[in-house]
Image: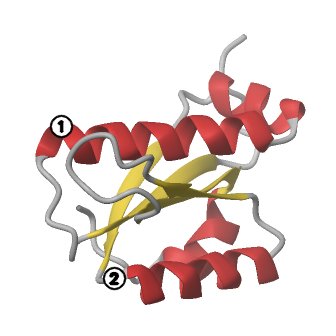
Amino acid sequence: MPYSCTEMPLKQVILARTDLKLDKGKLSVQVAHASVEAVMKSDKEIVAKWRRQGMKKVVLKVNDEKELHQFQQAAKDQGLMTALITDAGKTAIPEGTVTCLAIGPDREEEIDLVTGKLKIL
């Protein structure tokens, strides 16, 4: 079914820590973990609408774990779904390292209230 102009635009945002200086492969996997985890926790109807709209995703950068947690709390306060990713420690970084945070999928305007000033990774 094609995207309807009357549907609210939806997106997902993944915030990644820049202080970890992860290589591209490791970073990509952490972002993927965050995206999948958030989708699995999300309302099925929202996910279906988001899929119809092309599953827009944006990866943004945060400086460190403290900032990541601040955005997580702001998103929760806004009523948005979040998924915080903690690494298993099997490759490049120690077990328990918090790497990424996914927000949504949800209404683009709601997510932008939380993350709209962050820069693209």
Classify 51 as above or below 109.
above
Tell me where residue 22 appears, x and y as whole percent. Answer: 17, 56
Residue type at mark 1 is: Gly
For the residue carrying disc 2, how many other residues have a C-alpha within 10 Å: few (<14), some (14-19), or many (20+)? some
Q: Which residue is mark 1?
A: 25
Classify 31 as above or below 103.
above
Which of the pair 69/97 is nearer the observer?
A: 97
At x 66%, y 16%, the residue is 2
Q: Quadrant of residue 1?
A: top right
Indicate left or right for 87 with 60 as reference. right
- Name the colouring of the figure: secondary structure
Which of the pair 17/46 is nearer the observer?
A: 17
Q: Which residue is mark 2?
A: 64
Q: Quadrant of residue 112?
A: bottom right
Indicate left or right for 90 with 65 as reference. left
Tell me where residue 19 appears, x and y as whole percent. Answer: 21, 77
Indicate left or right for 1 with 58 as reference. right
Classify 26 as above or below 44.
below
At x 34%, y 37%, the residue is 29
Confirm or deny contact between disc 1 and disc 2 (CB under 8 A).
no
Q: Quadrant of residue 83?
A: bottom right
